[in-house]
Image (cartoon, helix red, strand yellow):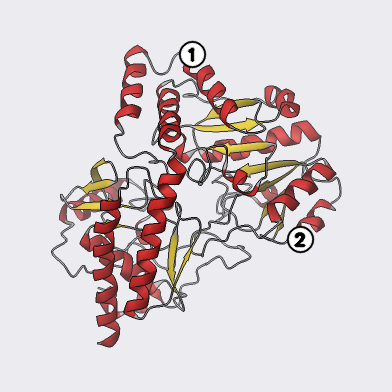
């Protein structure tokens, strides 16, 4: 058994794994066998029921858990494996432990778990009906709402997950331009489909044959992509670089503007994948912070505050292609998520949600910087304040990050050691203050371990 208080153990050695550097040419490979590694909590933080459920899960679910919920991505012995309930910005696990949550279900919970307005709208629609032969009026209402609040958007289409709309958007761009090749920043997470799946297992290389890569914040490398034979159908970028295992990177001055200019010049469709950041930075699309309007804008995560929904918004010149590309899904007419999205957007507008999240995020980040300095640790806090991420300097194996996140979980704060965090409008000044008292104890414990 390994104990994270003693530092790295043999479970971490000799196992190749991938961590994105500033070029981002890597993926989500885990550094260890999650069925072996175990971390021992040092508080009264008990996870007995959570562990028992995980043992059951391993018998009937490959790996017990999969995807970005895989066990090894959090601190075993401190982070719960299963949660029971949530309210506002608080979680309760199956053992009754409570947490102030700074992961927000990996982003969807933007106005808080169980938000009264959202749940009321969802309940009213559910009473009428959810999935039917053809859509409910809420589909038209939400499309009108999104078009009205989004610069440059003339239409909207809906799906369920971020992967749905990233892949769909490439089909629209190819149909509109008659070209096959598309460009993306190397290593960027755009979903789990074959053309962009970061681990590649199970997907033939042919699925990536029409994808060319360039480097974040490097317009010269994009120029080389634009020179590919046959030209580019599309260039897809995120509004800022937010890969797991790596500090977030904002766009350099002129980078997004340069992408926009080049797409217009070369007849390529500019696509902003705003699945992760959407509605936390700007209600008209995150790239509006940098004065850039794409041809296609993609949303999911925070769009419906936890209900399954994604959206693709586009300019009028792509309307015909969007109509001609065939896309459908069994639950594509679900009305409850559409109603929830309308209520979510109303809440965000009424609260000026991005400002609220930025303010609380700045308080959290400022407090963490002060605590780290006082404890003698060098940290990097990157990304926008509403979507921050903290790493320890000279911590290439993320050992300190894992130990810190585990100590925070023991005390009642849920953060991720490898993935960016999220604020919501449900986080109050009091929540931030309480969370910072717990992170202060975590830094203190790390310092004591180092001295010992």
**Residue 210 at least partly seen:** no
Which residue is most to the left?
44
Q: In the image, 200: left or right of 416?
A: right
Q: Quadrant of the N terminus?
A: bottom left
> Where's residue 125, x and y in %?
37, 17
- Label 1 – label 2 distance at C-alpha: 45 Å
> Where's residue 31, x and y in %?
44, 68
- Classify mark 2: helix, strand or loop: helix
In the rendered view, tell whether residue 330 sits above or below residue 362. Answer: above
Q: Which residue is mark 2?
A: 221
Q: In the image, 404: left or right of 225?
A: left
Query: Which of 50 and 386 lies nearest the eye of the viewer?
Result: 386
> Where's residue 436, x and y in %?
28, 62
Q: Earlier in the sequence, mark 1 or mark 2?
A: 1
In the rendered view, tell whether residue 327 sits above or below residue 80. Answer: above
The circle on residue 137 is 1
């Amino acid at each position: 058994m390994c104990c994270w208080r003693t530092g790295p153990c043999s479970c971490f050695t000799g196992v190749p794994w991938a961590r994105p550097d500033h070029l981002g040419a890597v993926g989500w490979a885990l550094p260890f066998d999650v069925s072996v590694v175990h971390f021992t909590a040092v508080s009264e933080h008990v996870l007995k029921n959570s562990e028992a459920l995980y043992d059951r899960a391993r018998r009937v679910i490959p790996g017990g858990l999969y995807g970005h919920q895989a066990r090894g991505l959090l601190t075993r012995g401190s982070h719960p494996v299963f949660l029971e309930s949530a309210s506002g910005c608080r979680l309760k696990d199956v053992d009754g432990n409570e947490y102030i949550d700074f992961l927000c279900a990996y982003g969807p919970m933007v106005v808080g778990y169980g938000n009264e307005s959202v749940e009321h709208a969802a309940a009213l629609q559910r009473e009428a009906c959810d999935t039917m032969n053809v859509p409910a009026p809420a589909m038209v209402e939400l499309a009108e709402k999104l078009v009205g609040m989004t610069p440059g958007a003339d239409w909207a289409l809906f799906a369920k997950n971020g992967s749905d709309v990233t892949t769909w958007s490439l089909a629209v761009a190819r149909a509109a331009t008659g070209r096959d090749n598309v460009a993306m920043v190397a290593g960027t997470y755009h979903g789990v489909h074959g053309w962009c799946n970061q681990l590649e297992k199970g997907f033939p290389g042919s699925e990536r044959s029409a994808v060319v890569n360039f480097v974040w914040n490097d317009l010269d490398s994009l120029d080389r992509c634009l020179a590919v034979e046959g030209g580019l159908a599309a260039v897809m970028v995120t509004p800022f670089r937010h890969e797991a295992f790596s500090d977030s990177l904002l766009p350099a001055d002129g980078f997004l503007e340069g992408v926009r200019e080049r797409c217009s010049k070369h007849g390529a469709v500019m696509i902003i994948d705003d699945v992760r950041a959407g509605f936390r930075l700007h209600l008209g699309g995150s790239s509006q912070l940098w004065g850039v309007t794409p041809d296609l804008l993609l949303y999911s995560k925070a769009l419906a505050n936890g209900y399954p929904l994604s959206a693709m918004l586009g300019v009028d010149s792509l309307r015909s292609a969007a109509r001609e590309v065939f896309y459908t899904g069994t639950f594509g007419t679900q009305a409850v998520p559409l109603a929830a999205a309308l209520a979510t957007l109303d809440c965000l507008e009424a609260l000026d949600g991005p400002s609220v999240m930025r303010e609380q995020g700045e308080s959290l980040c400022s407090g963490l910087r002060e605590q780290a300095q006082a404890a003698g640790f060098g940290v990097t806090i990157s990304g926008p304040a509403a979507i921050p991420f903290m790493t320890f300097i000279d911590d290439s194996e993320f050992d300190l990050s894992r130990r810190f996140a585990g100590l925070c979980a023991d005390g009642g704060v849920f953060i991720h050691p490898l993935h960016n965090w999220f604020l919501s409008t449900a986080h109050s000044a009091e929540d931030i203050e309480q969370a910072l008292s717990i992170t202060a104890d975590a830094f203190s414990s790390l310092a004591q371990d180092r001295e010992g």
